């Protein structure tokens, strides 16, 4: 009804101002409405949500350890723990910075498409490859996929105006977590009722990844990036893409929200340049100095780095703990249900936080300390308990609290610096 009313309004306005021979046809009005919607921030956000959902529906992921150590791959727990899984950590660390710079240079979308292609290749290799070297190669490509996550949100911020950052971020993160939830539930059903073998589950995952790949190709190409491709105008506008306001407006927004961007100092103008390599490095160094001269941003960035590193270590190795506490050979595992519940709670937190009226710039550090302490307690309970249900509950608490805190951290960092 909203679309129809807008079309009628557009039609009536053109009738009153247009000669009879130039009356716009309904088909042309529909095309104009479609073009207007595609220029709006909701269009790329919807596509990115679809991509985030289908790229994270991975039914086999909660049962990766039983799959690798079972008859399909016939690996030992020691091989998985000591020779295979560590490759992911070091490969992710090694490629993170180069991928970030490549993401900026290529303007985000190509890296999103590349991430989906590598994800498809990873699933295919997991289906057809065997042996420790092959599994190590899979861990390397998996680390590459994770490092490309930086393109997911930076793409969003290049096509969405600053005033829509919080809602767009909330929607995209929620889509990812709902994809994880759907994949975990689906995996638990397929495994518990023996509806599909692990190999057929992987084939099904390849189909879902192909849908994500098609969606990534349909994403509009950004015209700007933060460092390598900048388009400036006299009024400081960027046609709805890239930076959504001038430096002065962003400072005013930060002061209005009660946040000091740089302590008692005022931000200096961003160095101008021709966009060459030297200018890009200068701008990166300038941003580094400006960002970390803010104590608040330094605290939240340090928490982000440590918490994210710990989170990845936990989700990579928690199945080994579950397998040790209660071997899957003599116990019906509920890994998928646990992952689904933790992701669902995280999705609810990520979606609800954007509608919260809490001033996180004021109360965020209190929440940070309190909830991080609860996370640590949940991890201690997991480690020192011999009961699988305690381990499951501890993991649910840990993961849902992390998703809540990382969303709060995004909200705080957005207000501190337009870089985020």
Image: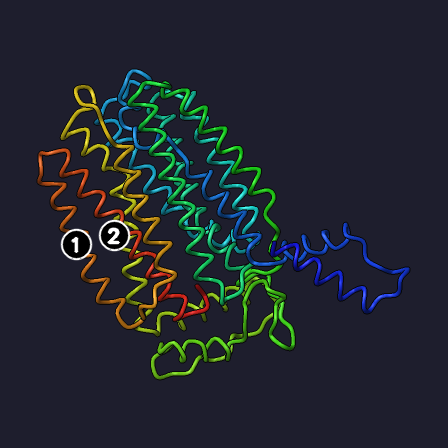
**Label 2: element kind:** helix
Residue 155 lies left or right of residue 76; in this view the side is right
Q: Is residue 265 above or below residue 110?
A: below
Q: Where residue 304 appears, x then y in whole percent?
A: 31, 58
Q: Is residue 265 above or below residue 8?
A: below
Q: Is residue 112 above or below residue 404?
A: above
Residue at position x 32%, y 53% in the image: 349
Name the residue beneath numbered marker 2.
401
Q: Is residue 50 above or below residue 373?
A: above
Q: Residue furthest top?
A: 71
Q: Where residue 260 appears, x then y in whole percent?
A: 36, 78
Residue nearest the viewer, comparing 68 with 388: 388
Name the residue beneath numbered marker 1.
374
- Displayed quadrant of residue 394: top left
Q: Please tell me the numbered disc located at residue 313.
A: none
Q: Where residue 276 appears, x then y in whole percent?
A: 59, 63
**Label 1: element kind:** helix
Question: How many callouts does the rendering have?
Answer: 2
Look at the image and name its color scheme. rainbow
Q: Where residue 205 appears, x then y in whole percent?
A: 44, 29
Residue at position x 51%, y 75% in the image: 270
Quadrant into which the N terminus falls: bottom right
Q: Residue furthest right?
A: 21
Residue nearest the viewer, comparing 243 with 253: 253
Q: CA distance from mark 1 to mark 2?
A: 8 Å
- Displayed quadrant of residue 71: top left
Badge 1 vs badge 2, beta-carbon distance below 8 Å = yes
Q: Earlier in the sequence, mark 1 or mark 2?
A: 1
Q: Quick one: label 1, few (<14), some, or many (20+) residues within 10 Å?
A: some
Residue at position x 50%, y 43% in the image: 50
Quadrant into which the C terminus falls: bottom left
């Amino acid at each position: 009804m909203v679309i129809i009313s807008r079309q009628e309004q557009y039609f009536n306005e053109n009738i009153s101002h247009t000669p009879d021979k130039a009356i716009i046809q309904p088909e042309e009005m529909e095309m104009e409405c479609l073009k207007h919607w595609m220029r709006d921030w909701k269009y790329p956000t919807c596509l990115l949500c679809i991509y985030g959902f289908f790229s994270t529906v991975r039914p086999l992921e909660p049962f990766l350890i039983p799959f690798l150590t079972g008859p399909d791959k016939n690996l030992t727990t020691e091989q998985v723990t000591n020779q295979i899984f560590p490759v992911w950590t070091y490969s992710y660390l090694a490629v993170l910075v180069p991928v970030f710079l490549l993401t900026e240079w290529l303007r985000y979308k190509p890296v999103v498409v590349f991430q989906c292609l590598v994800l498809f290749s990873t699933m295919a290799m997991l289906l057809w490859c065997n042996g420790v070297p092959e599994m190590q190669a899979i861990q390397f490509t998996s680390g590459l996929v994770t490092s490309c996550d930086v393109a997911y949100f930076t793409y969003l911020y290049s096509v969405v105006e600053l005033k829509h950052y919080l809602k767009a971020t909330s929607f995209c993160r929620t889509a990812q977590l709902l994809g994880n939830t759907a994949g975990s539930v689906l995996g638990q059903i397929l495994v518990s009722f023996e509806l599909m073998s692990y190999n057929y589950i992987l084939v099904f995952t390849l189909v879902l990844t192909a849908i994500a790949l098609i969606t990534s190709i349909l994403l509009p190409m950004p015209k700007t990036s933060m460092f390598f491709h900048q388009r400036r105008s006299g009024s400081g506008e960027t046609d709805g893409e890239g930076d959504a306001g001038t430096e002065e407006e962003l400072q005013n927004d930060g002061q209005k929200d009660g946040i000091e961007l740089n302590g008692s100092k005022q931000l200096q103008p961003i160095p101008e340049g021709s966009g060459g390599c030297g200018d890009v490095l200068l701008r990166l160094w300038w941003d580094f100095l400006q960002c970390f001269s803010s104590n608040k941003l330094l605290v939240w960035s340090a928490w982000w780095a440590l918490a994210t590193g710990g989170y990845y270590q936990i989700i990579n190795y928690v199945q080994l703990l579950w397998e040790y506490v209660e071997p899957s050979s003599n116990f019906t595992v509920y890994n998928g249900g646990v992952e689904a519940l933790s992701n669902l709670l995280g999705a609810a937190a990520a979606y609800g936080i954007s509608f919260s009226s809490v001033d996180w710039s004021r109360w965020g550090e209190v929440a940070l300390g309190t909830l991080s302490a609860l996370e640590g307690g949940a991890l201690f309970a997991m480690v020192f308990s011999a009961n699988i249900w305690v381990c499951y509950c501890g993991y649910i608490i840990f993961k849902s609290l992390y998703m809540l805190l990382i969303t709060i951290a995004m909200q705080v960092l957005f207000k501190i610096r337009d870089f985020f």
